[in-house]
Amino acid sequence: MLTDISLGRYISGTSVVHRLDPRTKMLAVLAISVGMIQGASLAGTAWHLGLATVALALAGLPARFALRSTRPFLWLAAVVFGSHLLMGGWGAWDTGLALAGRLLAMVTLASLLSWTTQPLEIVAGLRSLGSPFARLGLPVDAGATAVGLALRFAPIALSEATSILQAQAARGADFRGLRRKLALAAPMLGTLFERAFLRADVLAEAMESRGYSPAAPRTYYRRLGFGLRDLVAACLVVGWIAGGWLIDRGGW
């Protein structure tokens, strides 16, 4: 299951989605996600899931890959669906199912951002979008750098967790049953945190030895710039949100 999680992994490609400015993609994901939570109809959910599938196709990513990558988040969607049944009874099944589907659509879009955007581009985009706040004295550069490091560490942490699970299985660990899994989770998490702290310590020493300073001025080998494709993408995002809004309110 852990090997199915691919959030934070960049997949090289030359699709139109790959070539969009990272700021366009980040703002698009944010705007669409905010638009999704403005309604809870099943038809609107089908609209958002369908367009998320189209976005995957435009990025050259197969739907099977996206389904395998979002499979670990199905339990979270099940929790959302179950909580609505618990609070509202069987009469709330449609709302619970709609919100669970929209949650999966948001996860797919967030994953699509990481699949089609290199971590350094995400960091540069965050710095550019946060430049107004940097003038107010907020540590935008340090925050963007932290996000970039987290994206790079996510696949490494998953690989470490998989290695620990394989080592436990090789030593005869029995993962059958929820009680056994919970009993084995504590030592696995302890070892995982220990390895993560060791890697973080090595990374901090490497950054210090290279003279990294969050307050130092920075230059960029490749400067960001909006193009015609970004304008077209922005118009499509507006249509995406407007279409979902009309469907949720029975306009179509």
Image (tube, helix red, strand yellow):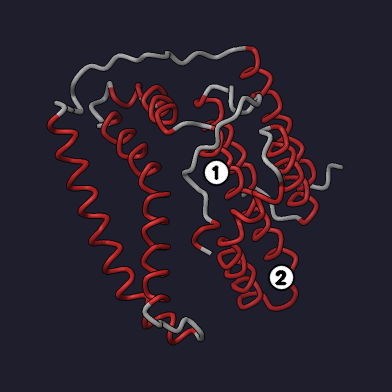
- The spot of residue 170 in percent (x, y) is 40, 75
Give the residue at x 77% y 37%: 243
> Which quadrant of the structure image shows residue 122?
top left
Residue of label 2:
92
Q: Amino acid at mark 1?
A: Ala
- The spot of residue 126 in percent (x, y) is 40, 29
Give the residue at x 74% y 38%: 54
Give the residue at x 42% y 76%: 169
Q: Out of 115 and 239, give the one closest to the viewer.
A: 115
Residue at the front extreme? 170
Q: CA distance from mark 2 to mark 1?
A: 27 Å
> Which quadrant of the structure image shows residue 205?
top left
Q: Amino acid at mark 2?
A: Ala
Which numbered dot is residue 200?
Answer: none
Which numbered dot is residue 110?
Answer: 1
- Tell us which disc is closer to us: 2 or 1: 1
Give the residue at x 24% y 49%: 199
In the rendered view, would you say 102 is above or below 181?
Answer: above
